[in-house]
Image (tube, rainbow, N blue to C red):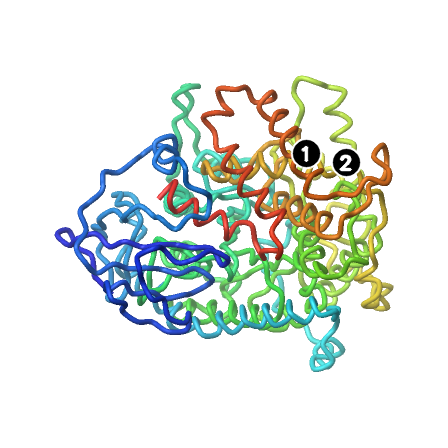
Amino acid sequence: MLELNKSSSVSEFDLISAHGSPPSHGLIIPDFDSSVVCKTTLAHRICFGIIVFTNHQPQAKAKATTTIEGRKKERKGMELGSNTIPEAAPSYYDVPEGVDIRGRYDAEFAKILTKDALKFVAELQRELRNDIRHALECRREAKKKYNEGALPGFDPATTHIREQDWVCASVPPPVADRIVEITGPVERKMVINALNSGAKVFMADFEDALSPTWENLMSGQVNLKDAVGGTISFHDKVRNRVYKLNDQTAKLFVRPRGWHLPEAHILIDGEPAAGSLVDFGLYFYHNHSAFRSSQGAGYGPFFYLPKMEHSREAKIWNSVFEKAEDVAGIERGSIRATVLIETLPAVFQMNEILYELKEHSVGLNCGRWDYIFSYVKTFQAHPDRLLPDRVLVGMTQHFMKSYSDLLIRTCHRRGVHAMGGMAAQIPIKDDPVANEAALELVRKDKLREVKAGHDGTWAAHPGLIPTCMEVFNNNMSNAPNQIETVKREDAAHLTEQDLLQIPVGARTMEGLRLNTRVGIQYLAAWLSGSGCVPLYNLMEDAATAEISRVQNWQWLKYEVELDGDELGVKVNKEIFERVVEEEMARIEKEVGTEKFEKGMYKEACKLFTRQCTSPTLDDFLTLDAYNYIVVLLP
């Protein structure tokens, strides 16, 4: 691997999607499991679903294009997913052996990307890369079984874990009360406002609410380091206002990316780093000392862990935590994490996941939007399990209620928090009537959660926090949680059939249109560097785009017959193309022609349409779109 320094030439790397093809260099590309130097000395490796090409021949440094519009012009006439990638910029970072930084140099980023911090991340990856690969291969094997007709269910081999009486480490005092948590990306102003919001916890997100550009990721690490150190501030020049932290702030949790997502800007031994280990490793390395307590373990740092499908993935995280605690010289169990149960296979592994993280767990969370996405993805080859319009798949559907009830029972039995789902509504400032109607929906949803036994809930906007707080406090007698008071023994009788029951409801043209309109608009923002997007009075993240595209794909694949005004009409490619055309016209009208032309709407439309009409369903939209991010916002 070429080690970059101030005088070395730039290397080229290419990222291609799983269904793409290698670049046209006249190369003989060997099997993906090998790593060779081809006849133009172009070496390649594959890791986490992305191929990295490194040209060892000296390259002339290309003139950098710093604007989205400029990069769009560079790509004129090229299709999304193309494999022609601009050359990497020179790297001036001081890196340990085997580590290569391909992102742009920035003096602030260099304070995060120190040699020792990168060495820590590299050690994590080298120690755990085979475990991660095995876990991802197991996902592929499970997917194959589901596509052949199998159904997910409880594992007979781990019956003893589910049936035995055991508990996780006790919930530490700093996070005993989590009745309202606010979530958002690691943007500087957002971090300050969220920590000052009055919520009990702020989950700073490197995952679904963040577009993973180099700028966003590294700025996010800088912002969190400053926040933990208490020095963070932000000067809003437009409003001429300076934002700083209050004396009392929310507890900080951090959500790294999932195991499947790579970080293409950091190569370790020639392979992309695991995005999860980059996010965790850099944050932990620079901030763990601020959480030390004379009162013992359990005082942080705190994390949220996404997208797991099996307890073997939780076991990897436990190994990460133990390694980190050993390197930092802190007590075992200092790190604490909540796992999002947001995949269908994981609902059958909740006890096992908590068991693997016993010393490090502070609960599970109902990641309900991604859970619905996972339901469609898991049953992509099951035409008898088609969902109705996604707006009808709420928590009162039997399979969703069963998932929530079993999560509460499992968590409280094991002595940890059972967190509720997201309230995605945004205050509607210019329409008091509509705003009150939205708040009433929030009240009803939060009342359902607290009555069911949840210990807390999520809000996407600070304006919702008082409403959520009031509902939970009024129904918990101001107790910090319900771990000891609501055991939900009735949920012990829930079966696999309860958790898999097919949801009921209509499938309508408006559902198809909404999926298309929202999916394209979210993706356009994501490709422009924004991962947390207000659309139609809701705060949307990647989960919404994922639900939208997989449901469109499912309806197209099985030519669903629509209900409502379009009763009997079958969803086919012709219908879908018409819907896309009409919804693009609507989007242009809503946002204005100037913004539409300058934005990434046309690129997003191509990508979204391709995903919806592909013969096979990609596991994640964000993996496909990430290739474009690396080019557009390097």
Q: Secondary structure at mark 1?
A: helix
Q: Is residue 480 visible?
A: no
Label 1 neighbourhood size at 10 Å, few (<14), some (14-19), many (20+)?
some
Tell me whether circle 2 and circle 1 mark residues in contact (CB < 8 Å).
Answer: yes
- Name the secondary structure under disc 2: helix
Which residue lies under the disc numbered 1? 579
Q: Is residue 349 above or below residue 102?
A: below
Which disc is residue 509 wearing?
2
Front residue of 479 and 288? 288
* Percent of width and height locating residue 360: 55, 66
Outermost residue toward the left in this view: 7
Query: Nearer the N terminus, badge 2 or badge 1?
Result: 2
Image quadrant where one finds the N terminus: bottom left
Task: Please name the residue shown 41% across and 26% down the image.
Answer: 242
As drawn, is 292 to the left or to the right of 421?
A: left
User: In the figure, residue 353 lies in which quadrant?
Assistant: bottom right
* Distance CA(mark 2)–CA(mark 1): 9 Å
Mark yes or no: residue 255 visible.
Answer: yes
Q: Residues within 10 Å of mark 2 (few under 14, many from 20)?
A: many
Q: Is residue 484 left or right of residue 5?
A: right
Disc 1 residue type (three-letter): Val
* The C terminus, quarter of image: top left
The percent coordinates of residue 132 (x first, y second) are 49, 70
Question: From the viewer's perspective, is 500 left or right of 363?
Answer: right
**Residue projecting furthest to the top:** 430
